[in-house]
Image: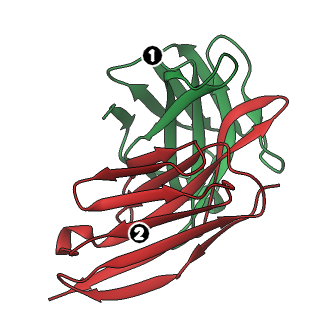
């Protein structure tokens, strides 16, 4: 099965500072999703990457997928209190009998301090 | 982005009763939906894949007779927790997959959108 490791498990960042979260897979990623979750709530879709070397940005959040498609990073520039939450990476699991199942990393809890 | 709704958002039921949770894709059609379970401060665990017009595919260790899934239309999947027990108390989240084009002739580009979740408490 696909193993996804997220790092760090948690981080505290001062408002206005940048932060980076990493997601590493034991196998080639056919689709990598980034979501944000607040505790006890659903997941908010951030970005999806499929091509090696792909990079996407939305507002102050940038996600990249490396050329080998085994590692992705999520970078937040000039963090704000609204960026606080749990960030999850999910990998598309490709099997012969199913398509599109996601396996998730353990999540990274982000706390933004004043 | 696309919108997926879940109903109810929370439910409390007595042990031995059944509870139905609905997952709807509001502005797109989803031939495939997924049901996840999340325990406090843990990541999501995939329970089953719900396919419109056919039987659901369950992950290893998930009891299909206990967690009944029905994907009756392209916008609705339901999860019924039968004969609920306190250990079934959890946060249940559904997701719906939307095709967003093709990367190649054989490789489609998908996006998955999640519902807000349903918190089930069995007393």
Q: Which mark is residue A86?
A: 2
Q: Residue furthest left?
A: A114
Chain under numbered label 1: B
The chain whose colour is red is A
Classify 10 Å Cα crowding around label 1: few (below 14), some (14-19), many (20 and above).
some
Residue B43: image quadrant is bottom right
Q: Quadrant of the C terminus of chain A?
A: bottom left
> Label 2 to label 1, Cα distance in Å?
28 Å
Q: What residue is shown with label 1? A: B29
Residue placed at 18% from the left, 75% from the top?
A81
Please tell me the colour of chain B: green
Residue placed at 59% from the left, 19% from the top?
B71
Is residue B41 left or right of A14 when viewed as pictured?
right
Is residue A83 left or right of A101 when viewed as pictured?
left
Residue A97: image quadrant is top right
Nearer the observer, B65 or B101: B101
Question: Can you give x and y, in whole percent of width and height, for residue A11 in the image?
Answer: 41, 86
Q: Check the image and report above or below for B103 versus A113.
A: above
Q: Circle 2 sits in a helix, a strand or a loop, which is it? A: strand
Residue placed at 37% from the left, 46% from the top?
B116
């Amino acid at each position: 099965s696909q193993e996804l490791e997220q790092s760090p498990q948690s981080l505290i960042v001062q408002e206005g500072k940048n932060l980076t979260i990493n997601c590493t897979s034991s196998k080639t990623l056919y689709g990598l999703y980034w979501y944000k979750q607040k505790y006890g709530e659903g997941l908010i879709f951030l970005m999806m990457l499929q091509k090696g070397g792909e990079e996407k940005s939305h507002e102050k959040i940038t996600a990249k997928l490396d050329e080998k498609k085994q590692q992705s990073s999520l970078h937040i520039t000039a963090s704000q209190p609204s960026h606080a939450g749990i960030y999850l990476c999910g990998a598309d699991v490709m099997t012969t009998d199913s398509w599109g199942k996601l396996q998730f990393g353990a999540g990274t809890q982000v706390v933004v301090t004043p | 982005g696309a919108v997926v709704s879940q109903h109810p958002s929370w439910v409390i039921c007595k042990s031995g009763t059944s509870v139905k949770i609905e997952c709807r894709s509001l502005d797109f059609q989803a031939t495939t939906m997924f049901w996840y379970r999340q325990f406090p401060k843990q990541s999501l665990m995939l329970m089953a894949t719900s396919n419109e017009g056919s039987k659901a595919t369950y992950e290893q260790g998930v009891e299909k007779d206990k967690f009944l899934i029905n994907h009756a239309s392209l916008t609705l999947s339901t999860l019924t927790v039968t004969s609920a027990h306190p250990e079934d108390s959890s946060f249940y989240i559904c997701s719906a997959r939307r095709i967003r084009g093709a990367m190649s002739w054989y490789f489609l580009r998908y996006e998955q959108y999640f519902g807000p979740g349903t918190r089930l408490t069995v007393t």
